[in-house]
Image: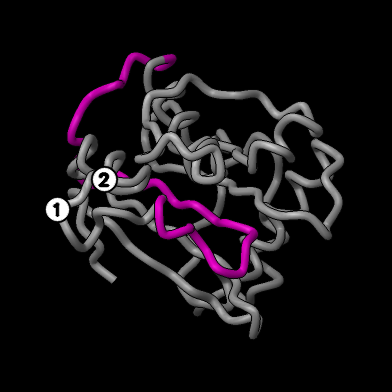
Amino acid sequence: MAKAPRDIASELKPGRVVPEPFSPPQWLALGDALDREMRQQFRIPASVDTIAIGWTSVEGLTRRRFQGASKVIRESANIPTPQPHVLAPTDNPQFADHAEQDVVNAFIDGLQEVSQDRSPLDGEFLRIYISHGDGPCTKCRQGLNNRQVYPGVLAEFSRRYRGLTVSVAWKNGQQQLEFMSLLGGERLK
């Protein structure tokens, strides 16, 4: 029997494995709970975006949260900045240092800490929940459907870890789940 959305969100505890969502209502409940957890941790008002939270199935990292925020939020909230392993596809500051870029770079930092910076991470996943109602911007999505253009953050990361399934979710303006799934640098859904 599937868990009710409020039940899966109530299982979320700092330092514990993030429960796996199996339905859009569970994704939304879990994403909202992760969003609240991060906002509380860094004292980020609910009225500002964008933040992102990631979690993974990779051994040694299952209890960690990979957190990211827009450049302005990160600086004012004192959120740690990960090493720049994956960069934005442009020098325009408007499209650099986005929340999803922080999450994938923090994930790579984590892999290096547990000596598992290996590719392709077959069968593992990285889940990312983004607070912005439009989800990842066009520059972060760049190259997912067209390999003829320079890859954005998500395509570059997904190509680097070809066997890792990357799921990105967000709540749209109608309070419904939007979702994309990536594998090998390609958008599956």
Residue at (50% x, 79% y) in the render: 1
Query: Which residue ends up furthest to the bottom in the rendered image?
Result: 174
Check disc 1 and give the amino acid type. Answer: Arg
The spot of residue 2 in percent (x, y) is: 51, 77
Please indicate whether residue 145 sits to the left or right of residue 110 in the image.
Answer: left
Magenta stretch: give its range: 113-139
Residue at (44% x, 14% y) in the render: 113
Question: Can residue 172 be seen in the rendering of this structure?
Answer: yes
Residue position marked by numbered label 1 in the rendering = 147
The spot of residue 7 in percent (x, y) is: 68, 68
State whether residue 144 is above or below residue 88. Answer: below
User: Which quadrant holds residue 36?
Assistant: bottom right
State whether residue 33 is above or below residue 2. Answer: above
Task: Tell whether label 2 touches label 1 (CB within 8 Å).
Answer: yes
The spot of residue 76 in percent (x, y) is: 81, 32
Check disc 2 and give the amino acid type. Answer: Pro
- Residue 151's disc is 2
Question: Can residue 103 be seen in the rendering of this structure?
Answer: no
168 vs 152, nearest the viewer: 152
123 vs 28, nearest the viewer: 28
Residue at (43% x, 37% y) in the render: 104
In what quadrant of the picture does the C terminus appear? bottom left
Residue 128 is inside the magenta segment: yes
Residue 86 is inside the magenta segment: no
The crowding category of the residue bearing disc 2, from other C-alpha atoms within 10 Å (few below 14, some 14 to 19, many at least 20), is many
The spot of residue 45 in percent (x, y) is: 86, 51
